[in-house]
Image: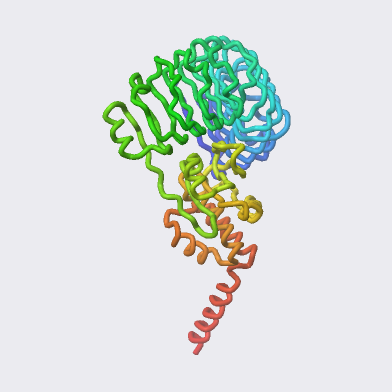
């Protein structure tokens, strides 16, 4: 049977259908009322970005195969073990401390929570994403892909083929060689100065060591390697004898000249990205994109010491810079307003220590909104005047419609539009007198 998908928002009528298999709730602001959802036969439920603080009670009456609870505000200890048919679960970006799971799961994403340790034994599990966890105890003979931020693994995963480790500062001590079937390895944002020695003996095909501190092109590469990602390191030269077996090389954000990149392009595929210029708004406050935040050479060049990340991106150099991370999507319904004052205080507290980078993914909407809110308060300017001021420096800044409404609210809260309102009121009264006369 072909899957039918129902999207429900505030205006949607209630539906009941035995043929319905999938439902997506869009910004419905649940009140956790079981009567709101009378769909017993659905197998896929998407409750992401719903501002949920607890699990909906109606989950107990559903026989789900796939459940998405990501990007909510669920906190504490939760139990989903009653979903005995569940195969795919995403609870990424909540405030969960611990979780009980059914043994049926094949794919799990529990990243960006408050879970310190995670233990799971399951013969069906094939893919696990669990960043921000300190201790992982996992046992599954079918696990082939693991993404985590810890090297404290208690696991026997001989059949693991893909391993991703991010934001771990002790990777050089870990024996990756124990995964004899591993073909793809990512060690990113781990502040590595060199590759772990065990990598040379592995049968890797793809190796990603982007966003580290590697200054010399690695010599100890596996002979089986065909794809190497060295983006955003400190490499200044590439000896040709070390790249003969490669088919593609990623070297954006290093210290390599463009002429070197062009000459290497005749030998192998190099998808090279030239970063946009980082723009200073005023007094050492910069607005940029994720590429700027990953390029340590740029961060050092502009004496950036503190970074505000307004995106679901992990810090690239967690111990080298002072980070404030606001994990939010670029959606009109996202509440950035609640972060305006805390970002203002963060900037004021750190601007004397060095320059500050405010960034999101593209460097336009989320980061632009935070920058606008800061300068509105700092300069006591209306939103319109602040927009003019900032866009004169960076024309690409463009908050989405929801963020603009929140900035208007911030303007009213601080009475920044009071002068303009008086002018408009005076003009309106003058026009009324003219009409009467």
Where does residue 390 sit, x and y in percent of width and height?
Answer: 48, 60
Colour mode of the rendering: rainbow
Toward which corner of the image does residue 156 lie, by quadrant? Answer: top right
The residue lying toward the viewer, choosing from 321 and 398, is 321
Of residues 261 and 382, the one nearer the viewer is: 261
Q: Judge whether residue 42 can be spotted in this image.
A: no
Q: Residue furthest left?
A: 266
Quadrant of the drawing holding the N terminus: top left
Q: Position of residue 78 (x, y in %)?
A: 70, 28
On the image, the x and y values in percent for residue 297 come to 48, 42
Residue occupying the far bottom of the picture: 437
Residue 190: x percent and y percent? Answer: 56, 30
Residue in the image at 52% along x and 49% along y: 366
Question: Nearest the camera: 322 or 218?
Answer: 218
What residue do we see at 48% from left, 40% from top? 295
Q: Is residue 423 visible?
A: yes
Q: Residue at x 71, y 30 (%)?
A: 97
Q: Which residue: 54% across, 11% down?
A: 142
Q: Quadrant of residue 379?
A: bottom right
* Residue that lies at the very extreme toward the right in this rendered image: 77
């Amino acid at each position: 049977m072909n899957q039918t998908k129902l999207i429900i928002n505030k205006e949607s009528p209630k539906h009941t259908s035995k043929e319905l298999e999938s439902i997506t709730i869009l910004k419905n602001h649940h009140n956790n009322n079981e009567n709101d959802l009378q769909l017993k036969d659905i197998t896929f439920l998407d409750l992401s970005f719903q501002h949920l603080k607890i699990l909906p009670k109606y989950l107990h009456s559903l026989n789900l195969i796939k459940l998405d609870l990501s990007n909510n505000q669920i906190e504490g200890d939760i139990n989903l073990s009653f979903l005995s048919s569940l195969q795919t679960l995403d609870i990424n970006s909540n405030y969960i401390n611990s979780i009980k799971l059914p043994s049926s799961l094949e794919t799990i994403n529990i990243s960006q929570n408050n879970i310190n340790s995670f233990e799971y034994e399951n013969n069906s599990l094939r893919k696990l994403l669990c960043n921000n966890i300190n201790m992982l105890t996992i046992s599954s003979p079918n696990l082939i892909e693991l993404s985590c931020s810890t090297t404290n693994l208690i696991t026997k995963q001989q059949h693991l083929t893909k391993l991703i480790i991010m934001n771990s500062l002790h990777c050089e001590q870990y024996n990756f060689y124990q995964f004899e079937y591993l073909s793809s390895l990512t060690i990113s944002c781990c502040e590595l100065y060199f590759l772990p020695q065990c990598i040379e003996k592995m049968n890797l095909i793809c190796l990603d060591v982007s966003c580290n501190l590697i200054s010399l092109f690695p010599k100890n590469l596996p002979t089986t390697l065909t794809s190497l990602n060295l983006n955003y390191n400190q490499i200044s030269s590439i000896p040709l004898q070390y790249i003969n077996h490669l088919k593609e090389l990623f070297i954006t954000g290093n210290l390599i000249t463009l002429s070197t990149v062009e000459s290497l392009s005749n030998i192998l595929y190099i998808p090279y990205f030239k970063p946009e210029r980082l723009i200073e708004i005023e007094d050492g406050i910069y607005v940029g994109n994720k590429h700027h935040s990953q390029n340590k050479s740029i961060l050092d060049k502009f004496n950036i010491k503190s970074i505000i990340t307004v995106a679901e991106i992990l810090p690239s150099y967690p111990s080298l810079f002072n980070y404030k991370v606001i994990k939010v999507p670029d959606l009109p319904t996202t509440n950035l307003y609640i972060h305006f004052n805390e970002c203002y205080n963060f900037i004021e507290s750190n601007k004397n220590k060095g320059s500050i980078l405010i960034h999101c993914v593209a460097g336009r909407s989320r980061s632009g909104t935070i920058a606008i809110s800061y300068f509105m308060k700092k300069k006591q300017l209306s939103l319109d005047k602040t927009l003019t001021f900032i866009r004169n420096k960076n024309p690409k800044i463009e908050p989405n419609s929801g963020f603009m409404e929140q900035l208007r609210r911030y303007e009213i809260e601080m009475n920044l539009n009071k002068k303009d309102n008086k002018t408009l009121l005076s003009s309106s009264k003058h026009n009324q007198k003219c009409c009467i006369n």
